[in-house]
Image: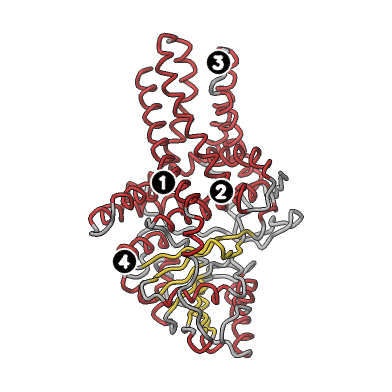
Amino acid sequence: MEILVLLVYATALLLLFLYNFGQLSLIITYLRSIKQRRKLIQPTAILSADDLPLVTIQLPVYNELYVVERLIDAVARIQYPKDKLDIQLLDDSTDETVAIIAEKVAEYKQQGFAIEHIRRPERTGFKAGALGYGLTLAKGELIAIFDADFVPDPDFLLKTVPHFSDPQVGIVQTRWEHLNENFSLITQLQAFGLNAHFTVEQSGRYAGGYLANFNGTGGVWRKEAIIDAGGWQSDTLTEDLDLSYRAQLRNWKFVYREDIGSPAELPVAMNALKSQQYRWMKGAAECARKLFVKVIKTPGISLPMKLHAFFHLFSSATFILVLVLGVLSVPLIYIRSQHPEWERVFMIINLFQLNLIILITFYGIPVWFLTGTSKAKLIWYFPMYSSLMMGLSLHNTIAVIEGYIGRKTPFVRTPKFNVKAATDSWAANKYINRRVSWLTVAEGALTLYFLGGLALAVYLQDFRLFFLHIMLMVGFGMVAIYSLIQAMNRTVSVRA
């Protein structure tokens, strides 16, 4: 049994190192491609007002009474000729959101906007179904998409549309910014992680010519590319990743504009963050199952592209590895104490702490180069963000396994709040799930489990995994406590 624990632990650590080696490749590509990326983000043409194409703006909405007015007002401020805008409110709502949208649509119609309140007869296919239904009615040759929590800048279209003068460009994605980053510790940590994705990952994939993903919102599609790739499909929870790959496998170009920010709201409640993470992780696993063989078989896809597609599509599996490493790290302390003759083996395992160096670099780049954040905060944000992700590893592992085995579940949207300042309250939000699930109980139990690991380390005087167990205890404790506080109908704002 001891040898089995050691082998499983070492295997998980090796697989995690291989994934992080792929991330290291993106780091190197990002750092080496500064001039190339500046050239790539330049549109191929500057279009006059007469030459601007007709754009349909799709706003998929489902029960968003707190943010839908803000969204519509922001879209109405976009600087683009009114006669070349076609705005669709794709409304699947079942509550008072319907009346709010109807009133706003009537208001902007009086101001001369081509804006429609679209209610499909049946809510099938969730967001993918709504986008697909709207596409059949869309008048534009380009399709811009914003989720309900986004507040696009007025110059969004003027900066993104010129890229489509290249007839092969099918997708233009922009970088997410954060309206409420400083609301709480949870939002700060989410922003820290997302900044790395939208800096190193997206820019690195774009500069390296690898397959990349539309992030579901804050981007523009060529309508022809959507249709040519097979349209929006609802057989995965991440319809955006799915369509992105299918379009690029059909030779449509992906453009990423790191310099264009699309402000959005971060989830402020733990259960809202969990629902978002569940959808992202399970959807990625479903896309891996659906698409990876197609990537391998598609002519013209180079070996580096296939390798990066593998790391990309199977990235959510890292949560399984993290959970396995965490759980086995406690008995590993005992095994070390019983087998001093195996010390050379443990030394080899320690070499894989290179993972830590890669991860610090990956998450540190946005802090160092792109944001106004104090550089010293990396010392705080990195371990706290890592702890949060470790704390979500049980929840996300379940999602990933369900994705791999093909277990279907409904699309659960992330509740929106319309809160920015730490003094804002979301306690009365009607969309929040306040039930205490068995998962929260399990996360609390794992908190105690890793506290036991700390006690065992003190008893055996072996502190080589002590910091890891502190992070695991803090992570699972943070997730469990925030979930319980939310269930008790209270808000919490922990300042960094």
Dot 3 or dot 2, earlier in sequence: 2
What type is the residue that disc 3 sits on? Asp
What residue sits right under mark 3 in the picture?
A: 462
Q: Are marks 4 and 3 in contact (CB under 8 Å)?
A: no
Label of residue 451 in the image: none
What type is the residue that disc 1 sits on? Ser
Dot 4 or dot 1, earlier in sequence: 4
Real-space Cα distance between discs 3 and 1? 32 Å
Dot 2 or dot 1, earlier in sequence: 2
Secondary structure at badge 3 equals loop
Real-space Cα distance between discs 4 and 1? 23 Å
Query: Which sits in the foreground, 73 or 119?
Result: 73
Real-space Cα distance between discs 4 and 3? 55 Å
Image height check: is 402 above or below 324? below
Real-space Cα distance between discs 2 and 1? 14 Å
Label of residue 251 in the image: 4
Query: Which sits in the foreground, 174 or 409?
Result: 174
Real-space Cα distance between discs 3 and 2? 31 Å
Secondary structure at badge 1 equals helix
What type is the residue that disc 4 sits on? Asn
Secondary structure at badge 2 equals helix
What residue sits right under mark 2 in the picture?
A: 193
For disc 2, the neighbor class at 10 Å (few under 14, some 14 to 19, many from 20) is: many
Q: Where on the picture, by quarter, is residue 177?
A: bottom right
> Residue 305: in sight, yes or no?
yes
